[in-house]
Image (cartoon, rainbow, N blue to C red):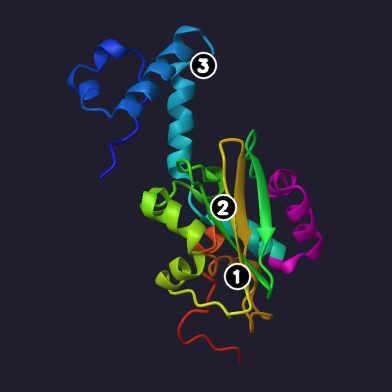
Amino acid sequence: MPKPRIALTNLHDLSADFLSLTPVQKIGVAIQELLIEKGIIAPDELSQSINLIDTITPAQGSRVVARAWVDASFKERLLTDAVAACLELQIDIRPIHLIVIGNTSKIHNVIVCTLCSCYPRMLLGLPPDWYKSSAYRARVIHEPRTVLREFGTHLKEHAQITVHDSTADMRYMVLPIRPDNTDNMKEDELAELVTRDCMIGVKIPQLPSGFSTA
């Protein structure tokens, strides 16, 4: 299991805990301490930011997708300026630059970060372990159709798959296609169909088992 993130106010308080961290985590702790020492951030601000991220779930992104499904003008704004569109729903993802790409009947989009695990956390919460794995990061670039099939997503052969590589400055989110037979569903009901994996692009929204359109 990954080690928990640590918000610290004094490196001398770490003792054995610091020694157990990975080299990357130690660098992160040292940067935190330097920012605090320089007065750029306060310890409380750091802890509050970490706690905020921990409370965010994919439901934030699901709200955005559902609104785009029911409001064509919002969808256009989302695909043009995702940061501004999210602000309309009181979701502030700044300073991250987010690009939302829409799936179509001909093009299916998938998100990856080949260098580490850059991810729109303010919309989707913490990334899943598989998203951070070296296997996913390498394979989805070279054999995306095979990787999608392993997630249970079987696309038509004519569908083109486009893989988008996130960076520290640029994050992506997929706007999936609205499922058929959902015309009578309300916005909040539609949001429940949108999972984290749908917004990464490895799965497609599905109606719940036994759902009736009558």
Callout 3: SS: loop
Residue at image mark 2: 60
Callout 2: SS: helix
Q: Nearer the viewer, residue 22 or 127?
A: 22
Q: Residue at x 66, y 66 (%)?
A: 103
Q: Residue at x 21, y 24 (%)?
A: 17
Q: Nearer the viewer, residue 211 or 13?
A: 13
Crowd rating for badge 1 (residues with CA inside 10 Å; few <14, some 14–19, many 20+):
many
Mark 2 or 1, nearer chain start: 2
Q: CA distance from mark 3 to mark 1?
A: 40 Å
Name the image quarter holding the C terminus.
bottom right
Magenta stretch: give its range. 69-89
Check disc 2 and give the amino acid type.
Answer: Gln
The residue furthest bottom is: 214
Q: Residue at x 74, y 55 (%)?
A: 79
Q: Which of the numbered marks, if any, corresponds to residue 190?
A: 1
The residue furthest left is: 16
- The answer to whether the residue labelled 2 contacts the one labelled 1, judged by CB atoms less than 8 Å apart, is no
- State whether residue 47 is above or below residue 1: above
Check disc 1 and give the amino acid type.
Answer: Leu
Q: Which of the numbered marks, if any, corresponds to residue 41?
A: 3
Magenta part mainly helix, strand or loop? Answer: helix
| Residue 182 seen from this side | yes
| Residue 90 seen from this side | no
Mark 3 or 1, nearer chain start: 3
* Residue 145 % position (x, y): 50, 70
* Residue 60 % position (x, y): 56, 52
Is 75 a magenta residue?
Answer: yes
* Residue 69 % position (x, y): 70, 67
Q: CA distance from mark 2 to mark 3?
A: 27 Å
Q: CA distance from mark 2 to mark 1?
A: 13 Å
- State whether residue 185 is above or below residue 32: below
